[in-house]
Image: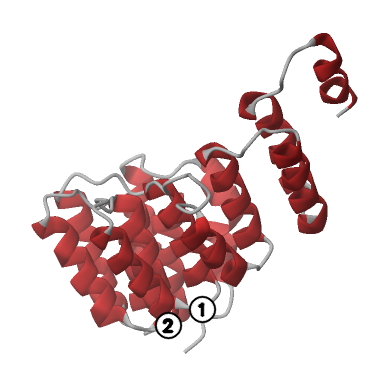
Amino acid sequence: MEVLEQIPKYGCTPNSLSYNPLLHAFCKQKKMDRTMAFVDLMVSRGCYPDIVSYNTLLTALCRNGEVDVAVELLHQLKDKGCSPVLISYNTVIDGLTKAGKTKEALELLNETISKGLQPDIITYSTIASGLCREDRIEEAITTFCKVQDMGIRPNAVLYNAILLGLCKRRETHNAIDLFAYMILNGCMPNESTYTILLEGLAYEGLAKEARELLGELCSRGVVNNKFMKKGAIKMLDGPATT
């Protein structure tokens, strides 16, 4: 801050490239009142926030549970001379779904499309995750199919969201089928994928099937010792929830 205070004395005007790192630092402190005061300082110095500045603010607002403020800011960007980009919408959609406001997230998705922006796999994975959190698995699967119809390749995040939703419903057999489809279509599972499946089997009282899956994964070198030590064995040795 002190350095920026001195810059005008040398006939130089700080720009958004100068202020954005400080803005990011303020946002990390999770004190939005101070952050917004800093933005006001930027403007008073004739330095207007750019899209990077606003995306940083949107992320901070969502992480601090102020998603309604983030939505309001998003809708004000054009008036502030800064058109929102896809990452702006993705950030707020993510904030809405995590706040349990999937209905509003879906409305924002439609707005994104109406603005001429093309949602990407991050957008749809976020929407599917929100739907699954609300046990709207059928709608999440519809989203999954829509992604494929659009020629977008589903990623592990999207698969994992639906796998988790199915396992929470105790539809582990369907989750296993989706896992096989995931492999068949060349999407590499990650540690979260295996954890979801193993926990789903164990919690459904299918410890034998879980051990068989774990054994198969180990024999194929899919999971390593680090994964085992992080709880796979302990999880399977624990009491199953039926």
Q: Depth check: 99 or 173 in front?
A: 99
Is the residue 61 above or below the residue 120 in the image? below
Q: Residue at x 58, y 52 (%)?
A: 59
Tag on residue 134?
Answer: 2
Q: Which residue type carries mark 2?
A: Glu
Residue 115 lies, in percent from the top left, at 28, 57
- The reply to whether residue 192 is in sight is yes
**Location of the N terminus (image quadrant):** top right
The first of marks 2 and 1 along the sequence is: 1
Is the residue 207 above or below the residue 241 in the image? above
Q: Which residue type carries mark 1?
A: Gly
Pair 2/1: label in front:
1
- The reply to whether residue 236 is in sight is no
Name of the residue lying farthest toward the top: 10
Secondary structure under tag 1 reads loop
Residue 152 lies, in percent from the top left, at 18, 49
Label 2 crowd (10 A; few <14 / some 14-19 / many >=20)? some
The residue singled out by tag 1 in the image is 100
Q: Is residue 95 left or right of residue 28?
A: left
Secondary structure under tag 2 reads loop
Q: Is residue 96 left or right of residue 178?
A: right
Residue 127 lies, in percent from the top left, at 36, 67
Q: Residue at x 50, y 70 (%)?
A: 96
Q: Are marks 2 and 1 in contact (CB under 8 Å)?
A: yes
Q: Residue at x 35, y 74 (%)?
A: 107
Q: Residue at x 59, y 58 (%)?
A: 231
Q: Depth check: 35 or 103 in front?
A: 35
Q: Is residue 69 left or right of residue 155?
A: right
Q: Is residue 162 left or right of residue 198?
A: left
Label 1 crowd (10 A; few <14 / some 14-19 / many >=20)? some
Q: Depth check: 11 or 147 in front?
A: 11
Q: Depth check: 194 or 23 in front?
A: 23
